[in-house]
Image (cartoon, rainbow, N blue to C red):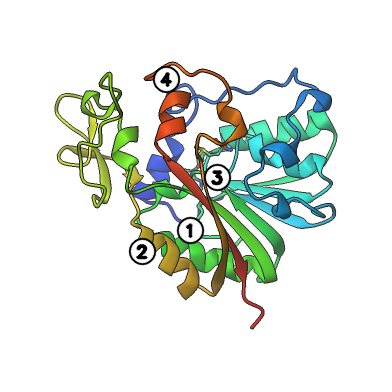
Amino acid sequence: MRVLVADKISEEGLKILGNQGRIEVDYRPDVTADELPDPFAVWAFPEVIKDAAGKDVLCLAGGGSQQSVAFGLLGCRVSVLDISEAQLARDRMAAQHYGYDVVTVQGDMRDLSAFGNASFDLLYQPISIVFVPDVRWVYREVARVLRPGGIYEVWHCNPTTAAVELDNPASGWDGVGYRISESGRAKVVRRGSDGYETFREGEPIGEFNHQLSEILNGLVESGLAIQAVSEETDESTEFDGPLEPGSELHKRSIVSLYFGVLARKLRS
Ligand SMILES: C[S@@+](CC[C@H](N)C(=O)[O-])C[C@H]1O[C@@H](n2cnc3c(N)ncnc32)[C@H](O)[C@@H]1O
């Protein structure tokens, strides 16, 4: 096991997935490559995957195979770093199933010392930076391992609507709309004495709400120039068709819960 930073944050990260974890991931080894969605139809920033063949790509804190499959099938040299060996096993299973190579590294997203300076053309980070309190710790390492001109695509929770995502009866569909009942300026996600998630009181659950200024200024300070931003909206192709009020997709068609930032490492 290669977890160089072993502390409360990496311990919490390990608890996220799997049978005991908070998030269940559906892994479907029976799906053939032809049945997978066309990445150019679903990718928020199609320019990232245009001409991706042959590029060195790191899926950062992105185990589970959802992203490594796309890059592997596009002909990239793909590596995955994740704190969870169970997640990385899914990346290896998928690579074997679809027939490409993958390098998996168990580690903490705050410490990319497994990789040399300027090792990658592209870093893709799905929603996972929520598990560290300070985005800058990750950005510094991202800037180091990216080649000059290299691309970093990173997905974040939207701090202005993060409260809607809390597993909390005060945050859901109230018959008219989605309630935002807590301040988006909170830092730490907690579990209150009633068992529900809140920003206000209770035990920290290991997730953090980052402010827009940290998210965006942190990139700029790390030498990563912002190229584009994408919000999930009801225009997204995923959200076609009538949606059940209160369902996850309906919520996400109304409230933009996530956004992606595309940044490029400056050449000097
Ligand atoms: C919500 S999943 C995102 C990845 C997945 N491919 C997806 O699309 O859903 C969050 C990932 O972050 C990983 N993780 C949590 N804390 C971490 C840490 N400190 N360092 C590296 N990975 C971490 C988890 O193991 C998990 O695989």
**Residues at marks 2 and 3, CA–CA distance in whole angstroms:** 19 Å
**Secondary structure at numbered mark 4:** loop
Report whether 27 appears left or right of 154.
right
Labels 1 and 3 touching (C-beta < 8 A): no
**Secondary structure at numbered mark 2:** helix
Camera-side residue: 43 or 74? 43
Task: Looking at the image, tell me whether mark 3 or mark 4 is earlier in sequence order.
Answer: 3
Would the CB of label 1 be found within 8 Å of ligand 1?
Answer: yes
- Residue 110, numbered circle: 1
State the residue position of label 2: 213
State the residue position of label 4: 247
- Which amino acid is tagged 1? Arg
Task: Looking at the image, tell me whether mark 1 or mark 3 is earlier in sequence order.
Answer: 1
Task: Looking at the image, tell me whether mark 1 or mark 4 is earlier in sequence order.
Answer: 1
- Which amino acid is tagged 2? Ser
Labels 2 and 3 touching (C-beta < 8 A): no
Question: Where is residue 236 drawn, in percent x and y?
Answer: 57, 36
Task: Looking at the image, tell me whether mark 4 or mark 2 is earlier in sequence order.
Answer: 2
